[in-house]
Image (cartoon, rainbow, N blue to C red):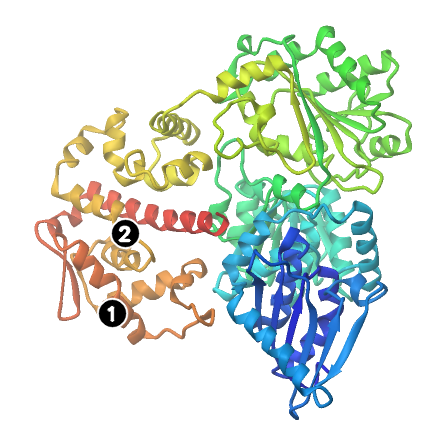
Amino acid sequence: MFFKSKKIDIIVAFLRETGVKLLKNDLELAKNNGVKIRILTGNYLGITEPSALYLMKDILKDKCDMRFYADSKRSFHPKAYIFHYEDGGGEIFIGSSNISLSALTKGIEWNYRLKKEDNIEDFKYFCYAFEDLFLNNSIVLNENELKNYSRQWKKPKVYSVKEIEEEIEKEKVINIFSPRGAQIEALSGLSKLRDEGMDKGIVVASTGIGKTYLAAFDSLKYEKVLFVAHREEILNQAEISFKNVRENFKTGFFRGNTRDLNVDGLFASVQTLGKKEYLNEKYFSRDYFDYIVIDEFHHAVNKNYINIINYFKPKFLLGITATPERMDNKDVFQICDYNIAYEIRLTEAINKGYLCPFRYYGIYDDSVNYDNINLNRGRYNEKELEKSLMIDKRANLILKHYKKYNSKQCIGFCSSKNHAEYMAKYFNENGVKACAVYSGVGENSINRSEAIKKLVNGNIQIIFSVDMFNEGVDIKTLDMVMFLRPTESSTVFLQQLGRGLRLDKNKKYINVLDFIGNYKKADMIPSLIGGKRKCNEKGNNPNEFEYPEDCIVDFDFELVDIYKKLLSKDIKIKDLVKEEYFRIKEELGHRPRRVEFIKEIDGEIYSKIRTNKKNNPFKNYISFLKELDEATEEENIFLNSDGYKLINYIETTLMSKTYKMPILLGIYNNGVMKGEIDENDIYVSMKDFYSKASNKIDIIDSKNNKEIEWNRDKYIKKAKEMPIKYLIKSGEEFFEYEKGVFKIKEPYKNLIKDNLFKDNFIDSIEMRVLEYYKNRGLKNIE
């Protein structure tokens, strides 16, 4: 039927991923034969899975027109498959089978086969009914509709956990190592990035999504693969994952004393490969690897990672992480030019059923007064904190609450080695078998592998750890995590919470005990566990917020009073930006330039100022510096000059595309500024700018997602049609264009030799390009 059809129309109440996978080979055969396929399905109760829609799109590409039924006043339960054949004949299968594994295999379904030649009027009637519904009662499932549906989708409650588990188990029989769920959506996002000419991208995905397998699936079209991580366990697990996905994949390691070369897949520790002695032609040419994966990408701002990223020139670089935000606010997104292929955070992952729900208990802890502990760059003094936490009154509070929940397998996250040993000793003395785990050698510490084995086997009930279980460890049967230190980093908190969120058939939820005092960043907690104020409500009681599906949150009443005060604080955006400026200045050791400030600024603060011209420092940077008493005397004078008018024009000019920037970079001329540039200068600057993959999105054929073949004439034509035209229109005071020459007008032309003008000129351009990337990345995930 698939191979002899010229057109196929499908109308079903829902699609599920397992059903689409069953039809994959037939659908590909139809696509390759040029068959046009139309699919109309429903979105009622979320039975249709987003991953099924993405997979269908991925299989059929542009051969498929897929739509949602859109009439909310009528129920939608049809199931029919209409085949139009090349010879004029046709068939309809009509009955009860949706596109799901159960419906297409062992489920009790009744379907009736109707041949066109035997039932012409009936065949015409069904075709007419389909046509009417498809054309007049539908929403086209374009990229935006798919993305919105995916974001709002929650695991349907009409399906029991047991039914879903049974379907997953059946799918494993079909193909145990094939993309599933969020992986399918992420692969679609990565494919789209490459279609747009990008050579790097980042996937932000919560624990449990299977990021390593995702990378393995995405690497299939590439020959030489490099996987970089900072822990041996991660490298070992990654090698197994890649071998499961890729047949006859010769692998090796580059770590410690091992230097495997001439392999298809190299799994390298960043500590070893990141050394300059290995980043040279003796070991690897710059284009040695076609595909590079940087695991736990939030570490990628560190020196050895940067060495690797700057040295190699792969066809594609993928960064994967669950937690891109860092405590020091360094921006990992900019390493990938804000090319965010896909993002699924904690709340969405729980709502979609990829992670286990939690029962969170915020326990008031007044045994420590954090006001008495010194802060250094936003962090508590380690020795003072350790001393304050290691008191019997607090340990007894922790033990008392721990015993309430009959935990069999628990991890308690501590502040230091001494703190972990102290807690293990206290619990052992009170009848609870415990151990401490941390890096290095200690009197009461055991190694991580041994500790996990003892925990799973029931020889101990709790592990007290210091940052040893944040990454690369899966204990699916864990039933409790305890936070025994103040939350100072959202990344660390989410990593540690994630240890308990893995799905397990014998676990309905994970208990989370968080012991909260008056520490500096306590107000982060409700948002970190997915809390949001209910629609149209302004209350500050975190117990009344909306949390992920099936999660229970209970803050002690003393904490509720604290949070009401903390969350009601109306800190002005202007003050937040000011604090952020001085934080970054201290971090850098010098006054930040525009481009440094926009790189390092906290993501949430940037989101607040992004569309706020009044409080956006990047729209008038020297004025901002003057308000902070940070501007030099020369800059204060410059503020009122003709030169700054031009600089402020660059800071504020509209930029729906990047086209203006390469024209201005032509004027800058690598620091030897020109008052005018001819067509050859324009061509060279445009070509150089758009040779960078992340800039290419502006010169892509948007209809076909293909890069246009650009030559000198095309670049010059584009420059005249777009950037030069609009630079002259909006900046007529500063620029002119005649006889193929773009010029800076007098008196601004006289400024090109002035160093202060020159520094601000290039800093403004670089800031605007980075701002464009940043805003584009935010837009893609909004």
In the rendered structure, the answer to whether residue 102 lies left or right of residue 179 reads right
Mark 1 = which residue?
680
Sequence-wise first label, 2 or 1: 2
Distance between the alpha carbons at the discs numbered 2 and 1: 26 Å
Numbered mark located on residue 654 in the image: 2
Amino acid identity at mark 1: Asn
Instruction: Identify the residue shown where x is 57% and y is 41%.
Output: 298
Q: Position of residue 82 (x, y in %)?
A: 67, 78
- Name which quarter of the figure residue 413 lies in: top right
Q: Is residue 285 visible in this depiction of the protein?
A: no
Instruction: Identify the residue shown where x is 75% and y is 70%.
Output: 95
Q: Nearer the viewer, mark 2 or mark 1?
A: 2
Instruction: State which quarter of the image contains the N terminus.
Output: bottom right
- Name which quarter of the figure residue 720 lies in: bottom left
Vertical side of 164 occupied by 9: above or below: below
Amino acid identity at mark 2: Leu
Q: Position of residue 650 (x, y in %)?
A: 24, 48
